[in-house]
Image (tube, rainbow, N blue to C red):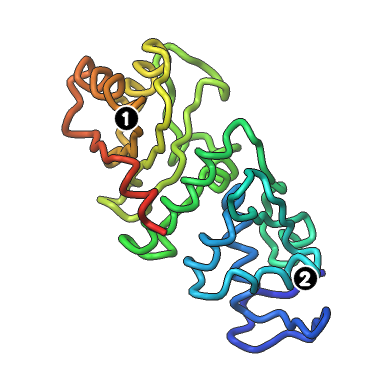
Amino acid sequence: MQLGAGSGGSAFGLDVGGFRVTARDLAMVRWLGRLRFAEARQVADRFDMDERNARGLVQLGLVAHRRVLYGQPGAYWATRAGLDAIGLTLPPAGIDIRTYEHDRLLASTAIRLEREFGRPDIKTERELRSRDAAAAQPHYAVRRAGQHGRRGLHFPDLAVDGIDGRPLAVEVELTAKGRGRLDSIVAGYVAARHIAAVRYYAAPAAKASLERAISRAGAGELFHIHDTEEITDAT
């Protein structure tokens, strides 16, 4: 089912229980497909609509819905049919309970960055990996110090294009990484001349170790640390 997301604001001839697919609906599927998932309130905030509007897309099979955490809003993600309908060449993502809070905050971070920099400039990790998978020279990924091959590449959680001709790498850090791994990532960013700067949204549990790693690398000018409260309050 190829619907063609470039059809302007016209409605499409698909009805399920009185629901008609519009250009905004397809934009919603595309946004969800670029992320892993987003909660109902995040979708509503991003598209300035009632949270219930996404239910029609679930009926059509373009989007899936699941309640994951008790007392929390349900989460939505693009299905294979939804990705195919908009021509987005990414695999379906879905939910991993182990990274649920991190992935949920990525949706809020994306919304915040879109408002700060403009929507076309934001790239998600799924897009970064797809773009750099076969690239001779990565545009977004950096090589961790002492690591070789594709497994040695580190991808930021999000990236913002158009800064000094190079991307701004954006990371959401909720827990403290081991010193060796964190040092190798920081060193990778320091050595990566194709990255303009790195912005971390760090939780209190991760902030101190991150600051120490940056200090050990003498890279204070490259890295900018923000509190995760800035994104938890974004929606």
Residue under label 2, please give it.
2
Residue under label 1, please give it.
204
Q: Earlier in the sequence, mark 1 or mark 2?
A: 2
SS at circle 2 = loop
Residue displayed at 77% across by 70% down: 2
Amino acid at dot 2: Gln
The quadrant the N terminus occupies is: bottom right
Residue sitting at the far front: 71
Residue displayed at 64% across by 74% down: 53
Residue displayed at 42% across by 31% down: 174
Q: Position of residue 173 (x, y in %)?
A: 40, 32
Rounded to the nearest angstrom, the CA distance separating label 1 from label 2 is 45 Å
Q: Position of residue 198 (x, y in %)?
A: 30, 38
The mark total stands at 2
Q: Is residue 1 above or below residue 185?
A: below
Q: Position of residue 63 (x, y in %)?
A: 72, 61
The quadrant the C terminus occupies is: bottom left
Q: Is residue 111 above or below residue 226?
A: below
Q: Is residue 232 above or below residue 142?
A: below
Residue displayed at 80% across by 64% down: 61
Q: With 145 as the anchor, is 134 left or right in this view? A: right
Q: With 181 as the anchor, is 126 left or right in this view? A: right
Specify the label residue 63 is tagged with.
Answer: none
Residue 34 placement: quadrant: bottom right
Label 2 neighbour load within 10 Å: few <14, some 14-19, many 20+: few
Q: Nearer the viewer, mark 1 or mark 2?
A: 1
Amino acid at dot 1: Pro
Q: Is residue 93 above or below residue 217?
A: below
Label 1 neighbour load within 10 Å: few <14, some 14-19, many 20+: some
